[in-house]
């Protein structure tokens, strides 16, 4: 069975500091991995994805994520956090051969001015 | 290109009623998926449609149904509403290849907030 874990419900970081939002996954075969962000009363906004290739994926708004197969992790990172990055972040996996996404429980990121 | 649109944005219904939600995918996208988001259960997959056919279904009761039209627009219906059906319902569209499976991204609409009283 496939699953995604986001071990931290809440992450606080000071503006200008680097941020990391953690995600680990469990899926049979090679996974497709995604990060989405959700602002209040909005849908999910796509940030980046890993399909294959380079383990470091760059996405929108300066975010990047590192795929680590041995640790089954796909952590989201940004070198310098902005207050406007404060939102709810979801990691998702799409198992091979499927079109639907399995989501983690979400991590609320707060960037403190 | 216009994004995924969902109507209505907000709905208030009472227990026992039924509701229909609508989703218009990004132009050219042929796959539409529906998700339910609640504080307790998080984001859960409802079903996916491609070429007017339901290809995949999540673990929801038969009260939840959907369909897709020839222009790829999709509707979902919930009959005999229960309090627990209160949620944000999200629609997502993606571009699929000829094999029906794609590495393409799912793009989400703003959602329909359903409140059941």
Image: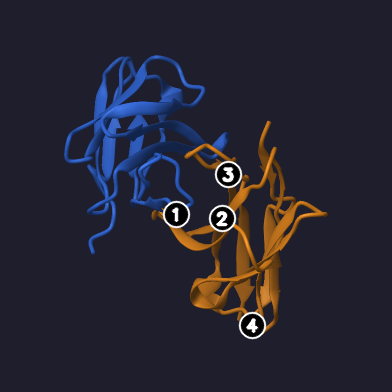
Residue B105 tag number:
1
Q: Which residue is mark 2?
A: A34
Q: Which residue is mark 4?
A: A80
Query: In the image, is B44 to the left or to the right of B68?
Result: right
Q: Which residue is mark 3?
A: A103
Q: Chain of mark 1?
A: B
Labels 4 and 1 share a subunit: no
Query: In the image, is B20 to the left or to the right of B63?
Result: left
Which SS class for mark 1? Answer: loop
Tell me if mark 3 has few (under 14), some (14-19) or many (20+) residues whose alpha carbon lies within 10 angstroms of its own: many
Residue B39, position as x, y percentages in the image = 54, 40
How far apart in space, not on screen, are marks 4 and 3 (Cα)? 26 Å
How far apart in space, not on screen, are marks 4 and 1 (Cα)? 26 Å
Residue B11 tag number:
none
The reply to whether dot 4 and dot 1 touch (C-beta < 8 Å) is: no
Which of marks 3 and 2 precedes in the sequence? 2
Query: In the image, is B82 to the left or to the right of A11?
Result: left
């Amino acid at each position: 069975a496939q699953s995604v874990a986001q071990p931290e419900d809440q992450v606080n970081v000071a503006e200008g500091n680097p941020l990391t939002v953690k995600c680990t996954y469990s899926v049979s075969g090679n996974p497709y991995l995604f990060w989405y962000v959700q602002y209040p009363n909005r849908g999910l906004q796509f940030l980046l994805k890993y399909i294959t290739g380079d383990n470091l994926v760059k996405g929108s708004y300066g975010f990047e994520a590192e795929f680590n197969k041995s640790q089954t992790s796909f952590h989201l990172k940004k070198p310098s956090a902005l207050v406007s990055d404060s939102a709810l972040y979801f990691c998702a996996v799409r198992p091979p051969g499927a079109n639907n996404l399995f989501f983690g429980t979400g991590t609320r990121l707060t960037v403190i001015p | 290109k216009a994004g995924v649109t969902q109507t209505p944005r907000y709905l208030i219904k009472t227990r026992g009623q039924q509701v229909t939600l609508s989703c218009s995918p990004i132009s050219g996208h042929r796959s539409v998926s529906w998700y339910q988001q609640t504080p307790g259960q998080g984001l859960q997959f409802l079903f996916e449609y491609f070429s007017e056919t339901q290809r995949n279904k999540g673990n929801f009761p038969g009260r939840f149904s959907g369909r897709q039209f020839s222009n790829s627009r999709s509707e979902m219906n919930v009959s005999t509403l229960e309090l627990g059906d209160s949620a944000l319902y999200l629609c997502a569209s993606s571009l699929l290849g000829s094999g029906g499976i794609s590495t393409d991204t799912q793009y989400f609409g703003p959602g329909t907030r359903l409140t059941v009283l």
